[in-house]
């Protein structure tokens, strides 16, 4: 008889692999399957936002991500013989509270590779060529049928997560509505290819009639460009180096440009869709299985990674004995975020057709540092707050005088941060369960940026969730109020 897993994950893209990493480092029994025969080979989603860089810091992959990526190049908008420079991002210097302030450019195949390597370091491995074809669930488990070269296998797990993309088999099996629209007349040919006759210091854009732009983005640490060619409604997408080169030359009016060594080619139809629910019983959805975006604003990959980062610790806590209602907070927190991000990326994409300057510019909305879970089930209104933060906000970094607060946060634990003698005394007295995520306690005093970053005026006790959001703030009644908050997030404290 097969042993029951903790979690089965369908889909080994960025969202599914992030979840597998987070669960594996918590010591859970996890399998991750993907119907593709091998890892993804294209550049597709290539923007990594500052908040996602913080997630990658916590998961232990940041150095590899930074080494394999670059800052975004300036745009070069070609208007006849002129190329107008345009900066999508205003590069910012790091600050004590935001250590990674700038969006990074990295082709998706390289992001996938870094995440897969990290999973293998933790003892996991993606099982390619294995397609989830169906499942049944009851009150205690999910049993899925997975088809591979050796025939079907029945896999039983406590929970199943579908991170299997916009055509998700898991979502379809749940018969969940995928609300939104797909414009089949709006298609973009995406081609990764070595290109000659074009400088690599710009992301080149050639506007066209009726919004039919062509763009070429140089991919870092390669001689490859990602080409995006918006097709006419009745246009057959060109195939092969010669046909694609002719199409590019016709649009750009530059006979020196040529592509060769095509590495990946796809015809993309911008979808704008959001699932009606993130969960049915013991089955969850994450990433593109739950929401699909236009390519503008680099939001889809980042939102999916943060879905996984939100869900991972909650699954682990419930498997360790926390109240199962904690899992209800996943949809309650993430679905409104996805809806807002969909609206943002859609607005940006619609503006691209007009070369609306606001659609080309990227700022704090895209960087996802200001996303919050205010008024959600884990961040009730009326809770204590500081002058700058409330429960449900991202917990910023701070300089502690020789170390960083993010150094303390890094790992699969909760963090209790005490400022002032009353808060420190309550921190020492707070009991914590032996099961589930451990607690790291820290008392902050002396010089540093903590008080400014956190808006601290007096004694304050802060509970930081494993995903880096504030789970509780106490400026009075330190011990009792924190105990109440802890009960909703952890197994019961013995004694």
Image (cartoon, rainbow, N blue to C red):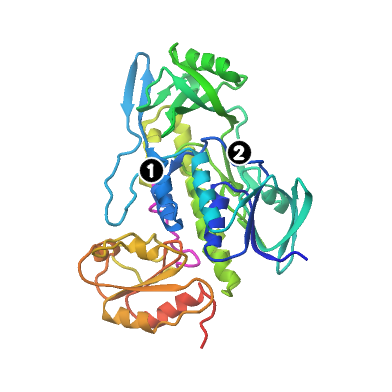
Residue 241, image quadrant? top right
Residue 103 bears which disc, if any?
A: 1
Q: Position of residue 417 (x, y in %)?
A: 34, 71
Tell me what residue is drawn at x 24 percent, y 62 percent: 449
Task: Look at the image and tell me in which quarter the N terminus lies.
Answer: bottom right
- Mark 1 Cα within 10 Å, few/some/many (few <14, many 20+)? many
Residue 317 in view here? yes
Residue 336 in view here? no
- In the displayed structure, 360 sits above or below 1; it is above
Left or right side of 331 for 139: right
Q: Which residue is mark 2?
A: 181
Q: Position of residue 394 (x, y in %)?
A: 39, 59
Q: Disc 1 vs disc 2: which is toward the camera?
A: 1
Tell me what residue is drawn at x 47 percent, y 73 percent: 438
How far apart marks 1 and 2 lie (CA) works out to 28 Å
Q: Residue furthest bottom?
A: 495
Q: Secondary structure at mark 1?
A: loop
Tell me what residue is drawn at x 39 percent, y 30 percent: 356
Q: Position of residue 478 (x, y in %)?
A: 36, 80
Residue 72 bears which disc, if any?
A: none
Left or right side of 365 for 242: right
Q: Position of residue 9 (x, y in %)?
A: 63, 55
Q: Secondary structure at mark 2?
A: strand
Main secondary-structure element of the magenta-colored stretch: loop
Left or right side of 122 for 450: left
Residue 373 in the magenta stretch? The answer is yes
Specify start and end residues of the magenta stretch as a single range: 366-379
Q: Could you tell me if the residues under marks 1 and 2 are in contact, i.e. CB atoms within 8 Å? A: no
- In the displayed structure, 95 sits above or below 293; it is below
* For marks 1 and 2 on the same chain, the one whose residue lies earlier in the sequence: 1
């Amino acid at each position: 008889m097969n042993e029951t897993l903790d979690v089965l994950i369908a889909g080994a893209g960025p969202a599914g692999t992030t979840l597998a990493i987070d669960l594996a480092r918590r010591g859970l029994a996890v399998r991750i399957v993907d119907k593709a025969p091998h890892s993804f080979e294209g550049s597709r989603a290539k923007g990594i936002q500052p908040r996602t860089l913080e997630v990658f810091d916590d998961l232990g992959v940041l150095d590899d991500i930074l080494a394999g990526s670059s800052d975004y190049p300036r745009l070069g908008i070609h208007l006849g013989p002129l190329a107008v420079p345009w900066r999508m991002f205003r590069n910012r210097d790091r600050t004590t509270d935001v250590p990674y302030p700038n969006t990074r450019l990295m082709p998706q195949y390289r992001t996938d590779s870094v995440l897969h390597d990290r999973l293998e370091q933790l003892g996991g491995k993606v099982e390619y060529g294995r397609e989830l074809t169906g499942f049944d669930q009851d009150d205690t488990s999910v049993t899925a049928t997975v088809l591979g070269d050796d025939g079907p296998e029945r896999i039983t797990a406590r929970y199943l997560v579908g991170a299997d993309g916009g055509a998700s088999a898991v979502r379809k099996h749940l018969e969940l509505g995928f609300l939104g629209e797909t414009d089949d007349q709006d298609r973009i040919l995406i081609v990764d290819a070595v290109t000659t006759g074009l400088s690599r210091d710009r992301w080149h854009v050639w506007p066209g009639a009726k919004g039919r732009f062509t763009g070429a983005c140089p991919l870092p640490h390669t001689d490859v460009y990602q080409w995006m060619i918006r097709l006419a409604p009745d246009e057959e997408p060109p195939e092969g180096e010669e046909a694609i080169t002719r199409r590019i030359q016709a649009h750009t009016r530059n006979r020196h440009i040529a592509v060769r060594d095509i590495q990946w080619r796809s015809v993309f139809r911008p979808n704008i869709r959001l699932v009606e629910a993130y969960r049915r019983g013991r089955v969850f959805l994450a990433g593109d299985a739950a929401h699909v975006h236009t390519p503008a604003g680099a939001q889809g990959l980042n939102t999916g990674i943060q879905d996984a980062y939100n869900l991972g610790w909650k699954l682990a806590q419930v498997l360790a004995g926390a109240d199962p209602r904690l899992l209800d907070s996943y949809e309650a927190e993430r679905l409104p975020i996805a809806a807002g991000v969909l609206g943002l990326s859609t607005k940006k994409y619609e503006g691209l057709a007009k070369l609306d300057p606001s659609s080309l510019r990227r700022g704090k909305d895209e960087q996802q540092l200001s996303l919050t879970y205010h008024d959600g089930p884990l961040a009730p209104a009326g809770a204590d707050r500081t002058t700058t933060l409330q429960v449900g906000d991202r917990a910023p970094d701070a300089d502690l005088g020789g170390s960083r607060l993010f150094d303390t946060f890094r790992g699969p634990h909760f963090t209790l941060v005490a400022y002032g003698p009353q808060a420190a005394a309550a921190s020492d007295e707070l009991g914590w369960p032996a099961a589930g995520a451990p607690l790291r306690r820290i008392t902050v005093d002396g010089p540093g940026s903590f008080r400014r970053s956190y808006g601290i005026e007096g004694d304050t006790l802060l509970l930081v969730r494993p995903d880096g959001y504030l789970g509780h703030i106490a400026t009075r009644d330190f011990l009792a109020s924190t105990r109440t908050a802890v009960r909703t997030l952890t197994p019961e404290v013995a004694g």
